[in-house]
Image: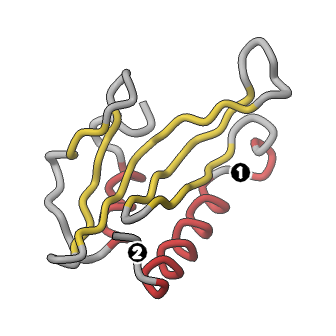
């Protein structure tokens, strides 16, 4: 089930602010952040110029947030090297999206930002 319009707008506003504030302006030609929303999933992505073709940008998934309509909680997922998503076991599902985003930003395990 897709996110409600209200929830979608809140998430878009929060991630737009996060993505625009995390990368210094002088580095935007080397890396940028974006996100995509599909159904009840929100994927945070990092974009970089391709190694051999720097005019082409490559998108790498960093983290995924999934909203459970029944519990009204968000869960955090991390990606393995094959692009398969796994529940991030160091944080329980929670109602506050910002708590999960802070966990991704801290990345104490190195699983999101490497």
- Residue at 41 percent of width and 82 percent of height: 4
Q: Residue furthest front?
A: 1
Residue 51: give x, y in percent of width and height: 72, 16
The quadrant where residue 87 appears: top left
CA neighbours of label 1 inside 10 A, class few (<14), some (14 to 19), many (20+): few
Circle on res. 3: 2
- Residue at 54 percent of width and 66 percent of height: 15
The mark that comes first in sequence, 2 or 1, is 2
Residue 7: give x, y in percent of width and height: 42, 81
Asked if residue 42 is positioned above or below residue 30 in the image, the reply reads below
- The colour scheme used to paint the residues is secondary structure
Q: CA distance from mark 2 to mark 1?
A: 30 Å
Left or right: where 46 falls relative to 40? right
Whether tag 2 and tag 1 are in contact, CB under 8 A, the answer is: no
Left or right: where 44 falls relative to 26? left
Where does label 1 land, which residue? 24
Q: Secondary structure at mark 2?
A: loop
Asked if residue 28 is positioned above or below residue 16 in the image, the reply reads above
Q: Residue furthest right?
A: 55
- Residue at 72 percent of width and 22 percent of height: 50
Left or right: where 39 falls relative to 36? left
Q: Quadrant of the C terminus?
A: top left
The quadrant where residue 12 appears: bottom right
Residue situated in front as seen by the camera: 24 or 72: 72
Q: Residue furthest top?
A: 52
Q: Secondary structure at mark 1?
A: loop
């Amino acid at each position: 089930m897709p996110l409600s319009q209200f929830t979608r707008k809140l998430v878009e506003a929060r991630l737009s602010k996060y993505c625009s504030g995390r990368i210094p302006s002088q580095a935007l030609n080397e890396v940028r952040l974006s996100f995509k929303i599909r159904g009840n999933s929100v994927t945070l992505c990092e974009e970089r110029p391709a190694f051999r073709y720097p005019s082409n940008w490559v998108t790498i998934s960093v983290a995924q947030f999934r909203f459970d309509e029944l519990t009204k909680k968000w869960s955090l997922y991390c990606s393995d090297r094959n692009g398969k998503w796994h529940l991030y076991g160091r944080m329980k599902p929670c109602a506050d999206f910002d708590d999960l985003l802070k966990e991704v930003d801290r990345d104490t395990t190195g699983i999101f930002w490497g």
